[in-house]
Image (cartoon, rainbow, N blue to C red):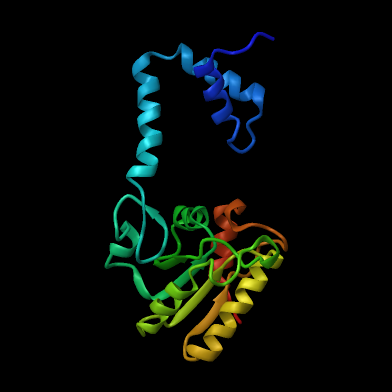
Amino acid sequence: MNKLPLPLQSLVDQLGMLPGVGPKSALRMAMTMLKWPQEKTRNLGQSILDLRDKLCICSGCSSLADSDPCEICADPARDSEKLCVVSEWDSLLVMEESGFFKGRYLVLGGLLSPLDGVDSNTLEFERLRKILGNGQIKELILALGTTLESETTGSYIKNMLVREFPKITLTRLAQGIPLGSDLKFMDKETLKQSMRYRQSI
């Protein structure tokens, strides 16, 4: 195979860093972009720049947003007595798409996994303490999935509540989520049932 021109090789190398994209797929993508009108490729490039320049982390819930606070945190109609804790932003998106939860959220930024270098200082536990310390939250709902890391993180939060916020009710999603599953892969009806029949911890 002939050596690719440097600009094309550079794009192929960058695209190849994306999850699930091998060298052949990256080359196909790059060749497709070469066939696009110049304006279309410029728009794609601008969108990638905007992704980094115009997104921010919400100071209220730690989710990705284009404003701070995000739309959810700024919505006065949300139930400020219920806080749903999720591991990542895409899990929040799944919860919101289902449309059945009208409380507030906190995105932890991952799950406790000491072997992977993710400890309590890496996640948003201090932000959680600050939110709970405001005295508005009556129920804390864990929507973390059912993996070993989820259980470890849930236990950490439970111990925090017992020590520091004993009056807050702790619940978690219940029926329908299989053991070992990740929340972001659940369908809406399963999530709805899990939230409706959540259990005390």
Query: Along the horizontal axis of the image, is 1 left or right of 157?
Result: right
Look at 52% across and 85% down and name the residue there. 161
Between 58 and 177, the residue placed more toward the observer is: 58
Quadrant that contains the C terminus: bottom right
Question: Is residue 79 positioned above or below 15 on the image?
Answer: below
Look at 67% across and 60% down and name the residue there. 116
- Spot the residue most to the top: 2
Residue 160, x across and y down, in percent: 54, 84
Question: Is residue 40 positioned above or below 79 on the image?
Answer: above
Quadrant that contains the N terminus: top right
Question: Is residue 163 positioned above or below 139 on the image?
Answer: below
Query: Along the horizontal axis of the image, is 161 left or right of 74?
Result: right
Between 60 and 196, the residue placed more toward the observer is: 60
Look at 36% across and 60% down and name the residue there. 58
Between 196 and 80, the residue placed more toward the observer is: 80
Residue 100, x across and y down, in percent: 45, 62
Residue 113, x across and y down, in percent: 66, 65
Look at 61% across and 38% down and name the residue there. 19
Residue 124, x across and y down, in percent: 48, 69
